[in-house]
Amino acid sequence: MPMTPPGSALRLDTVAQDLLFRQAHSTHVFTDEPVTDETVQAVYDLVKYGPTAFNQQPLRVVLVRSHEARRKLVGHMARGNREKTARSPLVAILAGDRDFHTELPEQFPLFPEAATRFYSDPAIRERSAEFNGALQVAYFIIGVRAAGLAAGPMSGFDAIGINKEFFAESAHFVLAVVNIGWPPEGARHSRGPRLDFEQVFTTA
Amino acid sequence: MPMTPPGSALRLDTVAQDLLFRQAHSTHVFTDEPVTDETVQAVYDLVKYGPTAFNQQPLRVVLVRSHEARRKLVGHMARGNREKTARSPLVAILAGDRDFHTELPEQFPLFPEAATRFYSDPAIRERSAEFNGALQVAYFIIGVRAAGLAAGPMSGFDAIGINKEFFAESAHFVLAVVNIGWPPEGARHSRGPRLDFEQVFTTA
């Protein structure tokens, strides 16, 4: 019986589907090859176009390049994340900027009042930076994979410690820490289960 | 002088880059062609693989198909979003499930204690459902584009009203409402500005 290949109903070709979703895996095992700023820039140059509310762009990224900064960051990671954070070719701290609204008049010129009308309340602003920052974290992970790199996003860390260490003088706050590197050839991964369509979708 | 085309440093081919990011736009103008459940299922079958913390999958989606449900939803949208929500071929309510942790022992069998160890506090759980739900919202938008569809994500609505109307008997809460349809041929969009690499990235 002929099988319809998975993803054939989509416009995106299956090579791209595999690269971004089907064959991609979170990992913390990489080759020794460095990840250059040029590659990271190419990633950002793609994913900066991902949509957010009112075109806000709260995402901020610290590329942890120095030995000293790496050592400090590792100290704030959960025990199980320390060794992989220590030995990844590149580690990025992804943060949200609570003061993103100051850029809104420029980023969303159609409705310059958005900055004051929706985001005058610091609590609303923080929640928005976290939610829209999370959208941008997801786009960034997709972009890392689009470069042929692999990403190991982590949520296990002392957020207060990282914020004090890296963002004491800014309105930024950590959203995720991501290990980044080139995947070793022929790496095999197991895949956690996923919910079925029927468990996620309902019709009203 | 020869120019390097944008995105040539990435593994993902430029057709896919255009489809997902460079040429894709948030829109609320679609053809009349319906969006079938089969297409939505193909989208989910791709983006369900997007990574989250502990493989949690808080995203829940209501496909608003009936006239009655559409009428109710439109009443909870911000004034500027009502007409476009009323006339889109498909509208999806994207929500987070506060009780996602009950599925964790199955979804993250490597560490079944995650459900109790990290998510016993309802406030932590809600925040996690919102953050990881937002990651899944972003993957879903990318998936809609991967199908050749266009997405019009909206954040302007009365969340309390939508939650009361659609989620009164569940632990779900609305994250975003997304208009979905097939883009008209040759549609042209203006693009809001994006922050430069240097505004977003720093090195430590």
Image: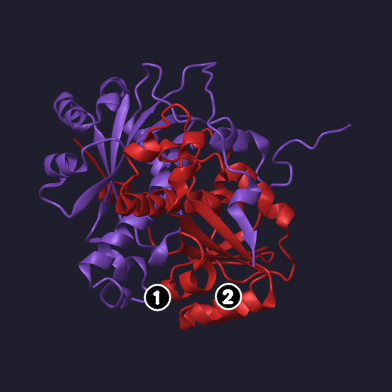
Chain colours: A red, B purple
Q: Chain of mark 2?
A: A
* Left or right of B76 in this view: A136: right
Q: Are marks 1 and 2 in contact (CB under 8 Å)?
A: no
A111 or B169, which lies in front?
A111
Q: Chain of mark 1?
A: B
Q: Residue at x 39, y 54 (%)?
A: A130
* Left or right of A173 in this view: B179: left
Q: Is residue A26 visible?
A: yes
Mark 1, secondary structure of its residue: loop
**Disc 1 versus disc 2: distance between alpha carbons?**
20 Å
Q: Quadrant of the C terminus of chain B?
A: bottom right
Residue pointed to by mark 2: A85
Q: Residue at x 48, y 29 (%)?
A: A109
Quadrant of residue B105 within the rendered picture:
bottom left
Q: Residue furthest left?
A: B169
Considering only vertical position in the picture, is A161 above or below B172? below
Residue pointed to by mark 1: B110
